[in-house]
Amino acid sequence: MNISANTDKILLTAAALVAALVAGLFFNVIIIKVAAKLARRKRNPFYESILNNCRGPLRAIFPLLFIGFTIMFLELPVGLHRSLESIISILLVASLAWLFVRSTAIFEDFAIQRMGVKDKDDPRARKIHTEIRIIKHILMFAIIIFAGANILLGFEEFRQIGATLLASAGLIGLVVGIAARSTVGNLIAGIQIALAQPIRLEDVVIVENEWGWIEEITLTYVVVRIWDLRRLVLPISYFIEKPFQNWTLTSPDLMGTVGIFTDYTVPVQEIREELTRILKESRLWDGKVNVMQVTHATENVMKLRALVSAANSGLLWDLRCEVREKLVYFIQKNYPEALPKIRTEIESFPKNELRSEELRKKPFL
């Protein structure tokens, strides 16, 4: 009889938990469908962001809530009851942390939509994007730390083990302290980046002799997308402690130079007029800077420098290549004698000296 009663109780408990799980999933489906219908009706990207980011966490939270509520009314042994409550509590805290982490993405989408920043070449847009991204990472870090601490502090055993380790392992404590100092330093550097903003997303920078764009800024590191699609990963403190070049700190438009070496016979004014014609026909030029100057002269060649401008670094690079190629072609076609050359002059010997030199070289018979 006892075995049969225990079996019935186990089956009843399992059936109740399964029913709670199914009810939670069913309730989640209803909520998601209603939210999707409202999002389609509103046609607002913010509602779509809420739906897309909350769909996964809610799929876990609702079943856990239903199961936890069901466990309260089940007649279970004290040990099993506490174990199930602890498991549900841990999973629920983790699911809520997941929901809050995804909510930071909602905050990011809402802030960007509210401030109306879309153009990546707009300095204001890149500034706002950078601030929002760093705030998002700070919130995510705080949520994860709080959730992890909440889970661990719920177990007396973990608190005792942690106290024993901290009391007896001085070396481990020292290592952890050093690591924490580095982490805190990076966190402070991240806050400084958010406030002072020496770099922003999509800024063009030169770091470690590499030219690229700021692709990602986190609390601990920065990813620079190099021009050849390599990624340079640097600690965020690098941009606080070391010098680097930021080409787009105030505005994305830039000036660049094109240098060409020519002979002294080149008609500089004609080259200057050709530069103007090339720039006016180019879709890459922003119409601001057009200068041709002789910047250097040696015993063999002189250097012409064209100064041009474009809306951003990528267009400027293409414009410089285009101008260089067309100027070289123009000189080759119209003034080939003005290409760089090396001059030599052979002086003739006097006749008597030349004759004596010939006799000296003539072999005796």
Image (cartoon, rainbow, N blue to C red):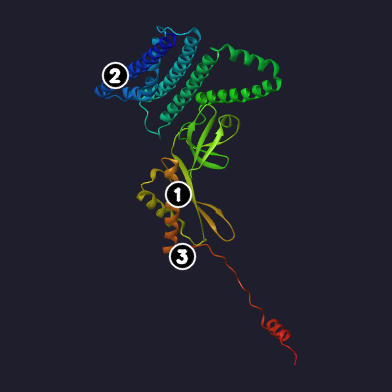
Q: Earlier in the sequence, mark 3 or mark 1?
A: 1
Q: Residue at x 38, y 24 (%)?
A: 56
Q: Which residue is mark 2?
A: 30
Q: Nearer the viewer, residue 318 or 114?
A: 114
Where, by quadrant of the figure, is residue 72 drawn? top left
Q: Residue at x 67, y 20 (%)?
A: 173
In this rendering, the label closer to the viewer, 3 or 1: 1
Q: Earlier in the sequence, mark 2 or mark 1?
A: 2
The image shows residue 310 at horizontal and vertical percentages of: 42, 43
In this rendering, the label closer to the viewer, 2 or 1: 2
The tag on residue 336 is 3
Amino acid at pointer 2 = Ile
- Tell me if residue 274 comes above or below residue 251 in the rendering: below
Q: Tell me the quadrant of the picture where the N terminus can be found.
A: top left
- Tell me if residue 198 comes above or below residue 92 in the rendering: below
The residue at the far front in this view is 1
The crowd level at tag 1 (other Cα within 10 Å; few <14, some 14-19, many 20+) is: many
Amino acid at pointer 3 = Pro
Amino acid at pointer 1 = Arg
- Tell me if residue 317 comes above or below residue 166 in the rendering: below
Q: Residue at x 64, y 14 (%)?
A: 163
The residue at the far right in this view is 364
Q: Which residue is mark 1?
A: 320
Q: Nearer the viewer, residue 60 or 218?
A: 60
